[in-house]
Amino acid sequence: MAGFCIDQRRRFEGKVWAVVQPHSVEAVQKTVRYCYEQQIPLTPQGGNTSMCGGATPSDSVAGLGIIVSLSKLNRVREVNLADNCITVEAGRVLQQVQQDAAAVGRMFPLSLASEGSCQIGGNIACNAGGVNVVRYGPMRDLVMGLEVVLPNGDLLSHLSPLHKNTTGFDVKHALIGSEGTLGIITAATLKLFAPARTHVTAWVGVDSIDHAVALLELTQQHFAERLSSFELISDFALELSSQHTQLSQPLSAPWHVLLELTDSTDNTLLPEQLGECLLGAGFENAVLAESEQQREQLWSLRENISDAQRHLGASIKHDIAMPIRSVASFVHACAPVLQAAYPNAKIVVFGHLGDGSLHYNVFMPDVLSNDVYQYEAGMNALVYEQVFAVGGTVAAEHGIGQLKTKWMDKMRSGTELALMLAIKKQLDPNCLFNQGKVLPD
Ligand code: FAD
Ligand code: 2HG
Ligand code: ZN
């Protein structure tokens, strides 16, 4: 069971007495009912790629609970082209769903570096983001219907592909982003889109984050919904990824933007239009991918940052988001404060600037591996103070898990927390589902 009990960062290790891998919804229900009757704590698990210990049992489970892994509940139930949607089971790997969509001439746009192992159920449970949010939104915007086993074993089934349904509260939105605390997602109906026939991918060097934001405004104004991705990468992050992938750096600059325009028609004018737009506005330090291979290399430099930074040891991760207009002032304010308190700290900054989210990861290369976590409380206090000052959030896309529960009361009002706890108590009165996650004690 070892692989299920430890997370991919090898930071959170829990104990359980069994791992259950149901093949059917009925088997999930039977398992959950048994846990309900016997009061056995339960941790739902998808691809176990969580960045915040969401899918591994917390200490409070103390070896007495089980993990329910959804990996074997992974079929495609239905493809419905008239309604442009697909119904899949929760354990289907995201990359497979992208391929399922492509096989019927459609596209499923959620895309993350972990797409080869994370699962649709996990994506929904975390309201995953990734690199296409600027055009298609996070997972919350891509779900039409859900099937969920509630903590008492009842099945909540709402997979119908209705485009409109204004009959009271939309309960699925309470489940999306609930990180396994309210039920086990067993299947979902997901929106499909027209595939992109034209991709125009540009790597642009900029002098500052302000310039990157100006470029975002410019490309949004010129290309509207065709702007699909807009990623910010610091020079240091690029250097790490370039060493890790053995790919050369496309250009040199203090900050980099990887942006992509897509069009569902064969739009041969788009590369030229982007080139003219960049030059006209003075963004001359730029390259456009001239082949699919070049495009893949540019994306590989971006998607490997997360892995590449592991060469610096363990990190204190800050998966933050803020109003886009405040990103530059946040970075300017935060780095000196952090560097003054921790002179040896190395900060790796990159993220999805198009939707205001930033990965602000702090390393102490001279500190041995997991020993770095002794600095976490101090660093978090400094970084999050700056995040709150600009009206940001401490969890943009990776969720709360067991890492950030203590920040919930800074992010949510007492009224909101009381409402969340009331829903939790109603659905899971014995607090068996994902104990020690998301909600404060
Ligand atoms: P798990 O890690 O297994 O679980 C995550 C949470 O969901 C846990 O709380 C778990 O209990 C719950 N859960 C899982 N399945 C179910 C289910 N069926 N029903 C109810 N609850 C369930 N995230 C982003 O948003 N954007 C990124 O760009 C991104 N990039 C990443 C890159 C790398 C290299 C890695 C390692 C991770 C990245 N992540 C990113 C984080 C992670 O991959 C996502 O959060 C992903 O959505 C988690 O899916 P999973 O199947 O692995 O879920
Ligand atoms: C990404 O955008 C992921 O690559 C991972 O969300 C971020 O490693 C990280 O902190
Ligand atoms: Zn990310």
Image (cartoon, rainbow, N blue to C red):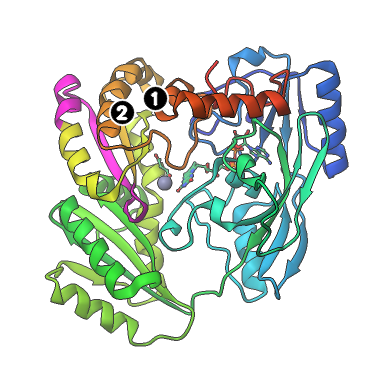
Q: Is residue 354 above or below residue 435?
A: below
Mark 2 or mark 1: which comes first in sequence? 2
Q: Is residue 358 above or below residue 313?
A: below
Q: Quick check: marks 2 and 1 in contact, CB under 8 Å?
A: yes
Which numbered circle lies on residue 410? 1
Viewer-closest of 100 and 381:
381
Residue 263: image location, x then y, percent: 44, 78
Badge 2: how crowded within 10 Å, few (<14), some, or many (20+)? some
Magenta-highlighted residues? 336-356
Viewer-closest of 24 and 324:
324
Say whether residue 28 is magenta: no
Residue 378: image location, x then y, percent: 29, 17
Q: Residue at x 58, y 64 (%)?
A: 108
Which numbered circle lies on residue 384? 2
Viewer-closest of 351 and 167:
167
Residue 303: image location, x then y, percent: 41, 52
Q: Is residue 126 above or below residue 260?
A: above
Q: Quadrant of residue 281?
A: bottom left
Left or right placement of residue 320 versus residue 25 in this view: left
Say whether residue 339 is magenta: yes
Which numbered circle lies on residue 62? none
Left or right placement of residue 330 versus residue 27 in this view: left
Q: Residue at x 63, y 76 (%)?
A: 105
Q: Residue at x 73, y 14 (%)?
A: 64
Amino acid on which the number 2 mark rests in the picture: Tyr
Amino acid on which the number 1 mark rests in the picture: Lys
Residue 363 seen by the camera? no
Tell me: is circle 2 under 8 Å from ligand 2. Answer: no
Quadrant of the image containing the N terminus: top right
Q: Which tag is nearer the camera, tag 2 or tag 1?
A: 1
Residue 375 seen by the camera? yes
The kind of secondary structure element at disc 1 is helix
